[in-house]
Image: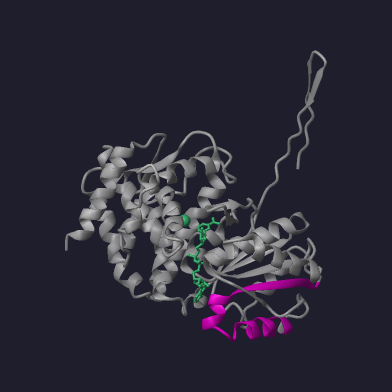
C-alpha cells in the first residue's frame, strides 16, 4: 500500500490528497466432491493465510439445495471433523431460503447478521455460503457488512452461480421493487465450484445459467460462441465434460473482465458484462421473478440482438443465429410481460432503461453487438426501434 501526500495552496484552502491502492486476489477452484474428506481444497483454502491456526466457520446453506441433498449438512460437519486441525464449524450449517425470496427483504440479511454476531465470527473467521446466485448475493451482503467485512467463501450450486455470479465481486438484495438496490462490491476470499453439486438441479436451472455463457461469448469471444453452437446438444443433455468446459470458459471470461477491464467496482457508467440485462432485470421484476435471471437474460439477449440489427450495427441474419442457439439450448424467447403497459400507456419494460442508467448514474450506457464476439457500447436507445424489436420477437414465437 502506498500513501502519498500532496499539498496544494489555494488561498485559505489546503487539500491533502489521500491515495492508496489495494490489490485483491482470490482463488477460484473447479473441483469435484468438495465435501468428501479426501478432498483437501476447503481445508487448504481456509489455512491459506495462517497455516497454523484453527479457523472458525459458519455455513449458510440454500434450502432449495437441501430439499434435494438433505444429507449435505452432515457431509459438511463430517468434513470439518476430519479436518479439525484447520476448521472449526461453530454451528451446524444454517438453512436459508433460496432463490429470489432471500433477496426480497432485509429480514433474512438481518437474521444472518445476528447469527454471525451470536457465533462470534470475526474478521479472521469465515462465512461459507453454499447455494445459488440469490443466496450468494444475500450472504455476500451479510459477510461484507458484519464487522465491516468478514471472509467469505462461496460455494456456488447453480450453473449461473458457477459460471457468472459466484466468481464476481458483487452482492446485494432487492429493495423497493428494484433488483440489487442494496448491496456492495466485495471480493470473496475464495470460490469453490463443485460440478457434482449441480447434479440435482432442476432442468430449468441447469439451462438458465447457460444464458450467461451465450452472453459473454457474444460480447467477448466469437470462438466460444461457435463452440457453444457445436456443443448445444451436449449442453442440453447436460453432458458432464461439455458443462464443465462451458462453466470454466464462461467464468474465466467474467474474471478477465473484472481483473483487466479497468473498472472492477463499476465506478464509470459502463456495465460491460451486462449485455441483454437492462430488459432482463425489468422482466424479472415485472414477472415477480417467475422468470429466472438466466431465462430473462436469454430474452434480453435476443431483444438486443434484433435491436442491434435494426440499428445497423450487426449484420442482418446474425440475430437469427443467436436466437437459434438460445432456442436449441431450451430457452423461450418471448414472455407476455414484454407487452405489459405502465399507467401512461408506454411499455413497462422500457422503464428498465431508466433503472439501468440510475443504477450507475451518469449517462445511459448499453452494450449492443457489432458482431458475434464483439460488444459495442451505445448511449442512446431509440424506443420506437426497441418496440419494433419486441414486435419481431412476438411474431417469431407465433410462427411455428
Ligand atoms: N452478484 C452478481 O454479480 C450476480 C450476477 C448474476 C446474477 N446474480 C443474481 O443471481 C440470482 C440468480 O441466481 P441463480 O440463477 O443461481 O438462481 P437462484 O439462486 O435463484 O436459485 C434457483 C433455485 O435453485 C435452488 N437451488 C440452488 N442450488 C441448487 C441445487 N444444486 N440443486 C437444486 N436446487 C438448487 C434455489 O433454492 C432456487 O430455488 C439473481 O438474484 C441474480 O440477480 C448476481
Ligand atoms: Zn446476469
User: Which one is nearer the viewer's eye here, 355 or 6?
Assistant: 355
The chosen color scheme is: one colour
Above or below, 92 against 157 in this view is below
Q: Is residue 181 left or right of residue 276?
A: right
x%, y% of residue 87? 75, 76
User: Which one is nearer the viewer's eye here, 235 or 74?
Assistant: 74
Q: Which residues are magenta?
A: 54-81
x%, y% of residue 88? 77, 77
| Residue visible at 49% across and 40% down in the picture | 357
Above or below, 83 against 127 in this view is below
| Residue visible at 78% across and 25% down in the picture | 6
The image quadrant where one finds the C terminus is: bottom left
x%, y% of residue 179? 52, 53
Q: Is residue 325 left or right of residue 257?
A: left
* Residue 178 appears anywhere in the view: yes
Quarter of the rendering containing residue 129:
bottom right
x%, y% of residue 272? 47, 45
Magenta highlight on residue 212: no
| Residue visible at 25% across and 49% down in the picture | 391
The image quadrant where one finds the N terminus is: top right
Amino acid at each position: 500500500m502506498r500513501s502519498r501526500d500532496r499539498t496544494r495552496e489555494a488561498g485559505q484552502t489546503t487539500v491533502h490528497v489521500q491515495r492508496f491502492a489495494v490489490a485483491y486476489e482470490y482463488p477460484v477452484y473447479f473441483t469435484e466432491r468438495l465435501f468428501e474428506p479426501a478432498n483437501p481444497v476447503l481445508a487448504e483454502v481456509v489455512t491459506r493465510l495462517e497455516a497454523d491456526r484453527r479457523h472458525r466457520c459458519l455455513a449458510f446453506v440454500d434450502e432449495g439445495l437441501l430439499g434435494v441433498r438433505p444429507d449435505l449438512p452432515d457431509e459438511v460437519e463430517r468434513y470439518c471433523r476430519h479436518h479439525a486441525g484447520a476448521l472449526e464449524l461453530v454451528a451446524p450449517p444454517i438453512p436459508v431460503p433460496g432463490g429470489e425470496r432471500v433477496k426480497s427483504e432485509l429480514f433474512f440479511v438481518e437474521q444472518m447478521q445476528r447469527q454471525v454476531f451470536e457465533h462470534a465470527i470475526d474478521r479472521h473467521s469465515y462465512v461459507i455460503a453454499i447455494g445459488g446466485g440469490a443466496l450468494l448475493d444475500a450472504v455476500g451482503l451479510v459477510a461484507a457488512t458484519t464487522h465491516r467485512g468478514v471472509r467469505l467463501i462461496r460455494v456456488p450450486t447453480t450453473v449461473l452461480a458457477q459460471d457468472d455470479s459466484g466468481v464476481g465481486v458483487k452482492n446485494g438484495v432487492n429493495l423497493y421493487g428494484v433488483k440489487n438496490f442494496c448491496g456492495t462490491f466485495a471480493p470473496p476470499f475464495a470460490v469453490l465450484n463443485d460440478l457434482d453439486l449441480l447434479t440435482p438441479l432442476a432442468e430449468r436451472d441447469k439451462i438458465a445459467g447457460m444464458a450467461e455463457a451465450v452472453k459473454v461469448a457474444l460480447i467477448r469471444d466469437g470462438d466460444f460462441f461457435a463452440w457453444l453452437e457445436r456443443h448445444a446438444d451436449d449442453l442440453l443433455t447436460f453432458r458432464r465434460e461439455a458443462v464443465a468446459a462451458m462453466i470454466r470458459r464462461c467464468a474465466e471470461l467474467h474474471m478477465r473482465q473484472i481483473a483487466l477491464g479497468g473498472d472492477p467496482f463499476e465506478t464509470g457508467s459502463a456495465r460491460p458484462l451486462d449485455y441483454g440485462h437492462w430488459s432482463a432485470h425489468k422482466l424479472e421484476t415485472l414477472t415477480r421473478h417467475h422468470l429466472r435471471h438466466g431465462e430473462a437474460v436469454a430474452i434480453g439477449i435476443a431483444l438486443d440482438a434484433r435491436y442491434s440489427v435494426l440499428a445497423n450495427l450487426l449484420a442482418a441474419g446474425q440475430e437469427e443465429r443467436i436466437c437459434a442457439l438460445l432456442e436449441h439450448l431450451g430457452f423461450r424467447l418471448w414472455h407476455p410481460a414484454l407487452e405489459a403497459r405502465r399507467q401512461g400507456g408506454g411499455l413497462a419494460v422500457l422503464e428498465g432503461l431508466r433503472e439501468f442508467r440510475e443504477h450507475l448514474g451518469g449517462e445511459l450506457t448499453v452494450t449492443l453487438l457489432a458482431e458475434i464476439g464483439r460488444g459495442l457500447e451505445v448511449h442512446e436507445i431509440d424506443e420506437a426501434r426497441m418496440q419494433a424489436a419486441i414486435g419481431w420477437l412476438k411474431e417469431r414465437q407465433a410462427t411455428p
